[in-house]
Image (tube, rainbow, N blue to C red):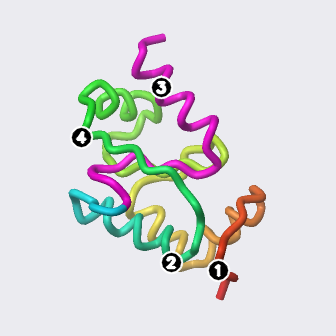
């Protein structure tokens, strides 16, 4: 296991919700990452953002880890959820909020 793979695996397994993204939650560096940040903030779920632009090994490694070619990538309780489009579609259908509730992830805002 490479150092990058071990770091990714640790982040995914030690955080209830983790978003591998371009930029930070406070300053997303791409529109897709920004959309997922807005969704997570709207839902009110605490999450960890990992800036893949800080480390090329993480940026390439996360794609291999999930077998998914694009960033951002959202994980909930160790499970890969998807990228921007999947996250947005799940949110709009109420499925993201339902998944968080089923996984026991506390949100600070009640589901609408």
Pick the residue in front: 111 or 14: 14
Measure the C-alpha gap from mark 4 to mark 1: 30 Å
Callout 3 secondary element: helix
- Tell me the element at label 1: loop
Neighbours of disc 4 within 10 Å: few (<14), some (14-19), many (20+)? some
Say above or below: 69 vs 1: below
Q: Which numbered disc, 2 or 3, marks the residue that appears first in the sequence?
A: 3
Tag 1 and tag 3, C-beta contact below 8 Å:
no
Residue placed most toward the observer, 22 or 108:
108
User: Which residue is labeled 1 in the image?
Assistant: 109
Q: Please name whichever residue, 82 or 1, is drawn nearer the observer in this view of the structure.
A: 1
Nearest to N terminus: mark 2 or mark 4: 2
* Residue at 66% across, 46% down: 77
Locate residue 10, reporting x and y percent: 56, 29
Q: Secondary structure at mark 2?
A: helix
Q: Which mark is residue 7?
A: 3
| Residue projecting furthest to the front | 26
- Judged left or right of residue 103, residue 53 is left
The kind of secondary structure element at disc 4 is: helix
Q: Which residues are magenta?
A: 1-25
């Amino acid at each position: 296991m490479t150092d990058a793979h071990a770091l990714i695996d640790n982040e995914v397994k030690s955080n209830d919700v983790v978003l591998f993204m371009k930029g930070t939650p406070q300053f997303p560096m791409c529109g897709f990452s920004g959309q997922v940040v807005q969704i997570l903030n709207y839902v009110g779920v605490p999450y960890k953002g990992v800036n893949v632009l800080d480390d090329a090994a993480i940026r390439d490694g996360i794609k291999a880890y999930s077998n998914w070619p694009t960033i951002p990538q959202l994980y909930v309780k160790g499970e890969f959820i998807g990228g921007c489009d999947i996250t947005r579609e799940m949110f709009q259908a109420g499925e993201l909020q339902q998944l968080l509730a089923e996984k026991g992830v506390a949100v600070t805002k009640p589901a609408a």
